[in-house]
């Protein structure tokens, strides 16, 4: 590795029943990058007609989730009553705060026709003073997100601020998150105002201080580094990072600064499912009747 690079992470493949994801974060040697506590590449996967994704309702606390699609569509439903299809380039930003329940499914038309799914799912940890904020959901169509143009490069600012632009997505700590399409020969300069920064190569190739990095790698940079990054093939990239938040605990879909908060959410989910969600802490999204049981360990 070059002096500018702290770590290179290769995703670990997880099979979700015929649908694979590449788990990047958390990683044993790097649990977070800025506030990003979870980072998965979904697919690419081709679903035949009559098949699709069915992630049953499940709880979250202490984080914000964001799904960014390259191909395909996913239908989000949550316990606040939001029902929103996400398409390539759009942002569904769900702040769990003190607690929310949601499902992710393939909508009927796409299930009937079949589709290709490819995207990134990320969790952004909330700062300690916002862990128990009220849950919320916001949909941002791609036309509402700033586009940053450089020679041979187009960058969509998903969240936070970078290169003089500010995303309309509400964040709770200093953050930047961009989807990048770059042509061969483009030169990428990292934002300099953040302590923790990483580049994920979805496809293509990036040469960093003379070292090649192909698709399916996250390159984590040292604080203050100014690497020379040349794109050597048409590439799809994700840039991410921000201010460090300190240690976070993750158990299942729950993120918190203390084990007590995780344990309370476990208890609340069991109580809610036992009572079939009547007058409980967690509730189901409207029109949903299934739920995901609490894992045994």
Image (tube, rainbow, N blue to C red):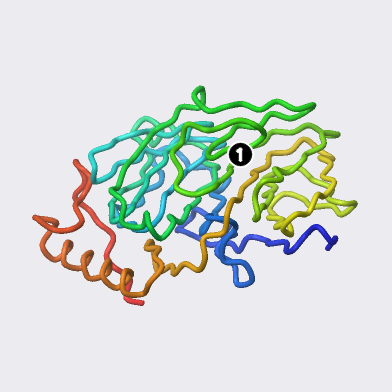
- Residue at horizontal 58 percent and vertical 43 percent from the top: 176
- Residue at horizontal 31 percent and vertical 42 percent from the top: 136
Q: Is residue 89 left or right of residue 220?
A: left
Q: Position of residue 129 (x, y in %)?
A: 38, 57
- Compare residues 163 and 29 and report the one nearer the observer: 163
Quadrant where the image shows the N terminus: bottom right
**Mark 1, secondary structure of its residue:** strand
> Farthest residue toward the bottom?
297
- Compare residues 133 and 146 and report the one nearer the observer: 133
> Farthest residue toward the top?
143
Q: Is residue 238 left or right of residue 225?
A: left
Establish if 119 lies above or below 293. above
Location of residue 107 (image quadrant): top left
> Farthest residue toward the right?
210
- Residue at horizontal 67 percent and vertical 34 percent from the top: 163
- Residue at horizontal 29 percent and vertical 35 percent from the top: 83
Q: Is residue 238 left or right of residue 37?
A: right
Q: Position of residue 270 (x, y in %)?
A: 20, 68
Quadrant where the image shows the C terminus: bottom left
Establish if 109 lies above or below 218. above
- According to the picture, the residue beneath numbered tag 1 turns out to be 178
Q: Position of residue 114 (x, y in %)?
A: 45, 36
Location of residue 181 (image quadrant): top right
Determine crowd level at label 1: few under 14, some 14-19, many 20+ residues with C-alpha closer than 10 A.
many
């Amino acid at each position: 590795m070059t002096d500018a690079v702290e770590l290179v992470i290769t995703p670990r493949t997880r099979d979700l029943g015929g649908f694979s994801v590449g788990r990047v974060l958390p990683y044993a040697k790097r649990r977070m990058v800025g506030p990003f506590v979870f980072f998965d590449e979904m697919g690419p996967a081709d679903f035949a007609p009559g098949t699709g994704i069915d992630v049953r309702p499940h709880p979250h606390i202490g984080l914000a989730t964001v799904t960014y699609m390259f191909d395909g569509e996913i239908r989000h439903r949550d316990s606040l009553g939001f029902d929103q299809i996400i398409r390539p380039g759009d942002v569904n930003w769900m702040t769990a705060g003190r607690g929310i329940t949601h499902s992710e499914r393939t909508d009927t038309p796409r299930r009937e026709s079949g589709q290709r799914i490819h995207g990134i799912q990320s969790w952004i940890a909330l700062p300690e003073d916002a862990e128990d904020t009220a849950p919320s959901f916001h949909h941002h169509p791609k036309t509402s997100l700033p586009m940053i143009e450089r020679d041979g490069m187009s960058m969509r600012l998903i969240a936070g601020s970078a290169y003089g632009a500010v995303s309309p997505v509400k964040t709770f700590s200093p953050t930047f998150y961009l989807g990048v399409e770059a042509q061969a020969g483009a030169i990428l300069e990292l934002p300099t105002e953040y302590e923790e920064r990483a580049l994920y190569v979805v496809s293509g190739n990036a040469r960093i201080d003379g070292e090649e990095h192909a698709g399916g790698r996250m390159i984590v940079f040292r604080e203050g580094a100014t690497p020379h990054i040349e794109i050597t093939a048409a590439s799809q990239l994700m840039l991410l990072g921000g201010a460090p938040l300190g240690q976070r605990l993750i158990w299942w879909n729950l993120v918190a600064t203390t084990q007590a908060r995780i344990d309370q959410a476990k208890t609340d989910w069991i109580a809610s499912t036992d009572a079939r969600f009547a007058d409980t802490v967690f509730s189901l999204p409207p029109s949903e009747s299934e739920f995901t049981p609490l894992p045994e360990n």
